[in-house]
Image (cartoon, rainbow, N blue to C red):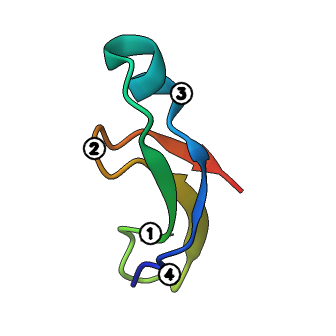
Amino acid sequence: MSNEWTYGFCESCLKNSHEKVRMKREKIISCNLSENHFKEMWVCPVCGATKEL
């Protein structure tokens, strides 16, 4: 489900723990089963912070 290319560093990890963690592009799927909807977002693999594309 995830792509392996990265975008920038996670601002939360950089600010809180001074670590340079690269964000990964992920598809976030709606939890509503009657919809077939998803968004592509940047996700931090360490803290879980997200940013919209």
Task: Work out whether residue 10 or residue 20 is closer to the camera in this orientation and state it.
Answer: 20
Q: What element carries label 2?
A: loop
Distance Cα–Cα, label 3 vs label 1: 25 Å
Position of 14 relative to 41 (above/below): above
Distance Cα–Cα, label 3 vs label 4: 32 Å
Q: Residues within 10 Å of mark 2 (few under 14, many from 20)?
A: few
Q: What residue type is labelled 2?
A: Val
Distance Cα–Cα, label 2 vs label 4: 29 Å
Q: Kindly indicate whether the residue at mark 1 contacts the one at mark 4 (C-beta within 8 angstroms).
A: yes
Position of 37 relative to 51 (above/below): below
Q: Where is residue 52 in the image (x, y as percent from the top left)?
A: 65, 50
Dot label at residue 46: 2
Q: Position of residue 37 (x, y in %)?
A: 56, 78
Q: Is mark 3 on a helix, strand or loop?
A: helix
> 4 left or right of 8?
left
Residue underneath mark 3: 11
Dot label at residue 16: none
Nearer-N-terminus badge (2/4): 4
Q: Which amino acid does label 3 sit on?
A: Glu
